[in-house]
Amino acid sequence: MEFDLIARIRARAPTRHDVVLGIGDDAALLQVPEGRQLVVAMDTLNSGVHFPEGTAPVDIGWKSLAVNLSDLAAMGARPAWCTLSLSLPEADAAWIDGFLDGFLALAKEFDVALVGGDTTRGPLSVCVTAHGLVEPARALRRDGARVGDDVWVTGTLGDAAAALALLQRGEAVADALRVRLDRPVPRVAAGQALAGIAHACIDVSDGLLADLGHVCAASGVGAAVQVDRLPASPALSDMGVDDALRRQWQASGGDDYELCFSAAAASRHRIAQAMSDLQVSVRRIGSIVVGDGVDVLQADGARWRPSRPGYRHFSD
Ligand code: ADP
Ligand code: MG
């Protein structure tokens, strides 16, 4: 079964000038430019875990590459190549075609060549590796945050979590929220612009607090975040849920694929200018402090504690 599917993939796979040998041999041959480091990321998406069962193949295709490009973005890397491992319950040409529509739309947008992969029969699962390039010493790592840094986040938080919560209740989801869950747009240009400016960076996949916590642990510092400063989209603000639930989604929801980064206060103007040039919104949400872990504070200075939101928090 695999050969037909591989031929279908190969016929549509985009290539690049630096792909010496792509799909069709035992392995790909890629020309890494002189003076660049290779940045490699891998993420797996399992049905029912990383996307709801019944998600359209086109959305699975998009998201499987998007989450990997988001990891490259968080390193400040320029994407170049990817490989694709597909486990499918059956050889389904229509499924593959839909999947490729999403996957390749994103690959073309970011000039990423699909250079190989693996195709097997099994439970629905998609594993992608993405390969990018970065100048030596410019990669954005998790371990570079310094006490006194500002903590920033791009875009808005909580939309994907809100969409997922509504889906799980079987309720209608506004398109503006649903698209954040199904079609995250990796912050590739922002990541590259921040390379050489930010001290530490991570992409927000597991929830802001968890991911910022990883930065703190790797850097040996703490962070203080103002919960009122977490950016919300109009779609999220207009949902009419109570503040506690909205903040919960923004702080801990996950699947945002925004960049959370730290940088010197002296870089504020440069960061604002660079993000404005890219038309990416960015907000300062707190600072790096002595200590460990992430403290979340309310406007009155009291510590914010996430509630354990049940459905009762919906105001409908
Ligand atoms: P091998 O047995 O040598 O691993 P395969 O039959 O698995 O060969 O793969 C043949 C070629 O097709 C290889 O170049 C491989 O990288 C590519 N390939 C297989 N599956 C995929 C896929 N899902 N996406 C892209 N390329 C693939
Ligand atoms: Mg193989």
Image (cartoon, grey):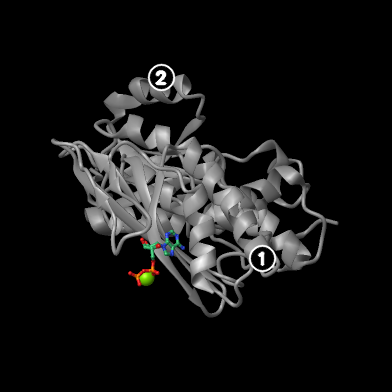
Mark 2 residue CB less than 8 A from any atom of ligand 1: no
As drawn, the residue found furthest toward the right would be: 316
Which is nearer the eye, 299 or 107? 107
Could you tell me residue 18's position as x and y percent? 28, 39
| Quadrant where the image shows the N terminus | bottom right
Q: CA distance from mark 1 to mark 2?
A: 38 Å
| Quadrant where the image shows the C terminus | bottom right
Density class for disc 2 (Cα within 10 Å; few <14, some 14-19, many ≥20) is few
Q: Looking at numbered disc 2 in the image, what kind of residue is underneath it? A: Gln
What residue is disc 1 on? 309
> Which circle, 1 or 2, is nearer the viewer?
2
What residue is disc 2 on? 273
As drawn, the residue found furthest toward the bottom would be: 122
Q: Residue at x 50, y 71 (%)?
A: 2
Could you tell me residue 183's position as x and y percent? 60, 48
**Res. 104 mark:** none
Density class for disc 1 (Cα within 10 Å; few <14, some 14-19, many ≥20) is few
Which is nearer the eye, 74 or 31? 31
Q: Looking at numbered disc 1 in the image, what kind of residue is underneath it? A: Pro
Q: N-terminal of the two: label 1 or label 2?
A: 2
Q: Secondary structure at mark 2?
A: helix
Q: Relative to 21, is 154 on the left or the right? A: right
Residue 240 in view here: yes
Q: Is residue 52 above or below residue 74?
A: below
